[in-house]
């Protein structure tokens, strides 16, 4: 009888231990979220957990002023860059970082990029691990109220963009600058140096089109002219026409467009003009109205 009692107690203890060790796999109150966007050559990736307002006082309440905040919920928010960047004018090497914020009741807030990204919240935050600290303006909307915390990466042009954190009425903007143009020029120079002579006209035309797109018609013109010198096609004449129009030389642009059309007619294998006909006719009509 005594042996049976001991066995029963042992089973109860094991059962109790087993029950205690179980974990419930339930949906998170602050679900995981993420976003990524490429500015130039730079991929910006953000992973975070998204808490809700739920009628709570956020700033100065749930998120105290003057303390390091995880800028999300649960695990530390992470932001990664695959190239070196500038954040608010300060250099930050390529890498993955934990992102923290120190909110303040008055004045600028502090945004922190920490080299120790694999941590829970800000519990183990150590200022010695900071890779970068920048001061930013916290803006508060009078109309828009974001129920759940949300990050966005927004591109402005080939080199510049910003990270936007929205929660409740807060709008926090972090300016991001890349070295896309420097790398693009290197790409152009390297490709032209390595290309066979018969392909250089095409690469020069592509370089001209790219430089026009980023708002540099002067340098673009030089590449377009070199492309035409190497091989006269409807494609490079049309790039030349658009560059002249960007410089407000509409008469020259119309002449270049006519040349592009003639080259296409004279060369049955030149299908560029026909593929772009709708766009070409629209712009030619616009230039005639301005010339």
Image: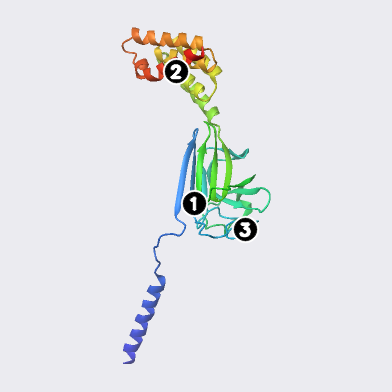
Camera-side residue of 112 and 9: 112
Residue indicated by mark 3: 60
Q: Residue at x 46, y 45 (%)?
A: 35
* Element class at badge 2: helix
Sequence-wise first label, 3 or 1 = 1
Residue 34 visible in the snapshot: yes
Residue indicated by mark 2: 283
* Residue 187 to residue 247: above or below: below
Separation of disc 2 and disc 3 at Cα? 55 Å
* Element class at badge 3: loop
Camera-side residue of 193 and 204: 204
- Residue 146 image point, x, y percent: 51, 50
* Residue 62 to residue 15: above or below: above
* Residue 178 to residue 262: above or below: below
Q: How many other residues sit within 10 Å of disc 3, few (<14), some (14-19) or many (≥20)?
A: few
- Residue 285 image point, x, y percent: 44, 15
Residue indicated by mark 1: 48
Q: How many other residues sit within 10 Å of disc 2, few (<14), some (14-19) or many (≥20)?
A: some
Sequence-wise first label, 2 or 3 = 3
Q: Which residue is drawn at 36% across and 11% down?
A: 264
Q: Residue at x 53, y 59 (%)?
A: 55
In the image: residue 127, left or right of residue 192? right
């Amino acid at each position: 009888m005594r042996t049976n009692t001991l066995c029963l107690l042992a089973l109860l203890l094991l059962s109790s231990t087993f029950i205690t060790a179980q974990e419930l796999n339930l949906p998170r109150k602050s679900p995981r979220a993420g976003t990524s966007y490429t500015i130039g050559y730079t991929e910006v990736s953000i992973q975070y957990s998204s808490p809700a307002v739920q009628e709570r006082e956020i700033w100065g309440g749930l998120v105290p002023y003057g303390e390091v905040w995880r800028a999300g919920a649960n695990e530390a928010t992470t932001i990664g860059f695959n190239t070196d960047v500038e954040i608010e004018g300060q250099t930050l090497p390529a890498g993955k970082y934990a992102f923290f914020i120190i909110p303040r009741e008055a004045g600028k807030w502090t945004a922190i990029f920490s080299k120790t990204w694999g941590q829970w919240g800000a519990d183990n935050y150590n200022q010695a691990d900071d890779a970068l600290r920048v001061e930013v303006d916290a803006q508060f909307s009078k109309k828009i109220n974001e129920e759940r915390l949300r990050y966005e990466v927004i591109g402005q042009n080939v080199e510049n963009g910003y990270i936007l954190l929205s929660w409740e009425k807060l709008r926090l903007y972090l300016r991001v600058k890349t070295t896309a143009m420097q790398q693009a020029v290197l790409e152009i120079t390297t490709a032209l140096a390595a290309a066979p002579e018969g392909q250089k006209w095409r690469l020069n035309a592509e370089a001209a089109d790219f430089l026009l797109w980023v708002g540099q018609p002067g340098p673009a013109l030089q590449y377009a002219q070199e492309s035409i010198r190497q091989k006269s096609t409807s494609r490079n004449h049309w790039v030349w026409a658009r560059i002249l129009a960007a410089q407000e030389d509409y008469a020259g642009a119309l002449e270049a467009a006519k040349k592009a059309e003639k080259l296409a007619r004279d060369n049955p294998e030149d299908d560029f003009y026909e593929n772009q006909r709708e766009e070409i006719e629209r712009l030619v009509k616009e230039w005639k109205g301005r010339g």
